[in-house]
Image: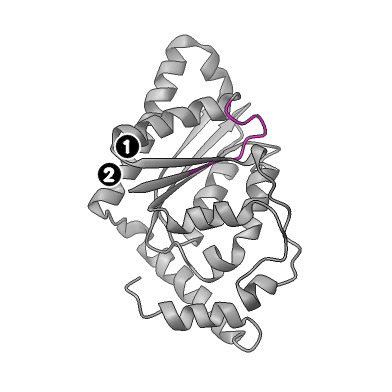
Amino acid sequence: MKIVVINGSGTGTSGATGHVLAGVVDGVRVAGAEVKTFLLTELTINPCKGCRTCQKTGQCVIDDDYPEVGTAMMEADGLVLASPNYISNVSSHIKALLDRSFSKLFHCQAMHGKYGAVLIVSGGPLYQQVEDYLLHVIGTMGCWKVGSLSVVSDRMNIPDERIKVLEEAMGLGRRLVEAIKTRQAFPEQQEEREMTFAMARCLVESQKDNWHYEYEYWQKHCGKDK
């Protein structure tokens, strides 16, 4: 079992997001899964140009590190997206990654049926919309939403609170792995998942004369048990 962890913090492993995320990774490993972590600050993932070439050919015209990350996400059993709260939104690193993923992960639903979790680290208490957004994102990919953790960074400076945060982080990592092992379903998410899947297929089919790659993908994969 492989879990891909995406660290979208500009400070990589040295900031609060990286420290809390290390707890999630520990939980994943303790539960018996393999982890592949990507530090987006150490990679080059440029903004999407909106040229739609990927929808037509399956290949992006931008030459950077995105293909490695995108392929790893599609091949993984589970995904963790971690971001600091930057002005009530995700970091630019995470946003660029998501924008570049729109064809295969969103339109083609290439991660449908997999599992995801979310981590937000914030300097203050106004983080809920960022947490909700990333949960929405993994759901729109077609992943089961296992859970999320939001942490105010000052807690990491208080020894007793730091211990609690890392225990919570480890718990999230373990829950993600256990959900995958048991193929856990979340009935309250079922209707939303089915609607998202149907909308993506309908959108692509309506553009079959333009989005050749996406349409061929659906023709090949839509018969699978989603």
Rounded to the nearest whole Å, what is the CA distance between mark 1 and mark 2? 6 Å
Residue lying at the far bottom of the rendered structure = 209
Q: Residue at x 42, y 33 (%)?
A: 24
Classify residue 211 as left or right of residue 179.
right
The image position of residue 145, as x and y in percent, is: 41, 51
Classify residue 152 as left or right of residue 179.
right
The image position of residue 71, as x and y in percent, is: 52, 57
Q: Is residue 205 above or below residue 9?
A: below
Q: Residue at x 41, y 40 (%)?
A: 35
Dot 2: few (<14), some (14–19), or many (≥20) neighbours within 10 Å?
A: some
| Residue type highlighted by circle 2 | Glu
The image position of residue 34, as x and y in percent, is: 36, 41
Q: Which residues are magenta?
A: 5-13
The image position of residue 137, as x and y in percent, is: 53, 55
The residue that mark 2 highlights is 178
* Residue 108, magenta (yes or no): no
Quarter of the image holding residue 47? bottom right
- The reply to whether residue 46 is visible in this rendering is yes
| Residue type highlighted by circle 1 | Arg
Q: Residue at x 49, y 53 (%)?
A: 72
Q: Is residue 33 above or below residue 167?
A: below
Q: Nearer the viewer, residue 88 or 109?
A: 109
Q: For the residue labelled by badge 1, is the local secondary structure a helix, a strand or a loop?
A: helix
Q: Are marks 1 and 2 in contact (CB under 8 Å)?
A: yes
The residue that mark 1 highlights is 174
